[in-house]
Image (cartoon, grey):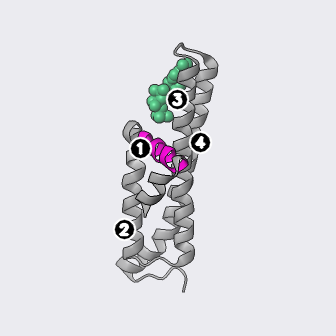
Amino acid sequence: MLRFFVGRRPAFKHAFQGLKFVLQTQYNARIHLAMTILVVIFGLLLRLSNLEWAIIVIAIGLVWITEIINTALEALVDLVTQQYHPLAKIAKDTAAAAVLFASFIAVLLGIAIFTPHLLYLFFKFNLNP
Ligand SMILES: Nc1ncnc2c1ncn2[C@@H]1O[C@H](COP(=O)(O)OP(=O)(O)OP(=O)(O)O)[C@@H](O)[C@H]1O
């Protein structure tokens, strides 16, 4: 199915090449991938509700989207200049801040969603009786 879309539509092919580049070159992206897999496994084991899944998907998506845009901006800055430039620093640092901010939000949402499940699992303590 995936091969059908990727093989026939250049836009999909280019997007997947971009994603491949992000995964191959960005150390953070590999951490995001590991965290994504871990969160999905825990979500399945803890049987999250539909609403909880929706929030988790948005949180994970936010981190991936900012990381991908951060990588694009880094490449663009490096294309414009290889020299040290204060504006290049601002562009790269603010793009990195977006990833940090998204990751922080994702961690907070993850804590808010998983804490009640874990409290119930380990202590039979119901936060929302
Ligand atoms: N041309 C430049 N001019 C000024 N500062 C730069 C320049 N290139 C990089 N920097 C500084 O070095 C930092 C790291 O830049 P680099 O291109 O190595 O990104 P990176 O290590 O891949 O970043 P990230 O961890 O966000 O993926 C930037 O955040 C910026 O502060």
Disc 2 to disc 4, how far (Cα)?
26 Å
Q: Which residue is mark 2?
A: 41
| Label 1 beta carbon within 8 A of ligand 1 | no
SS label for mark 1:
helix
Label whose residue precedes the other's in the sequence (1 or 3): 1
Label whose residue precedes the other's in the sequence (4 or 1): 1
* Vertical relation: 114 (above or below) 126: above
Badge 2: few (under 14), some or many (20 or more) residues near its Cα, within 10 Å?
Answer: few
SS label for mark 3:
helix
Q: Which residue is mark 3?
A: 75
Boundaries of the magenta span? 11-22
Disc 2 to disc 3, how far (Cα)?
33 Å
* Vertical relation: 75 (above or below) 36: above
| Label 3 beta carbon within 8 A of ligand 1 | no
Disc 4 to disc 3, how far (Cα)?
16 Å
Tag nearer the camera, 4 or 3:
3
Label whose residue precedes the other's in the sequence (1 or 2): 1
Marks 3 and 4: in contact by CB < 8 Å? no
Label whose residue precedes the other's in the sequence (2 or 4): 2
Label whose residue precedes the other's in the sequence (4 or 3): 3
Measuring from the top left, give residue 15's x and y in whole percent: 51, 46
- Front-most of residues 102 and 68: 68
Badge 3: few (under 14), some or many (20 or more) residues near its Cα, within 10 Å?
Answer: few
Q: Which residue is mark 1?
A: 20
Q: Amino acid at mark 3?
A: Ala
Tag nearer the camera, 4 or 1:
1
SS label for mark 4:
helix
Label whose residue precedes the other's in the sequence (2 or 3): 2
- Front-most of residues 84 and 117: 84
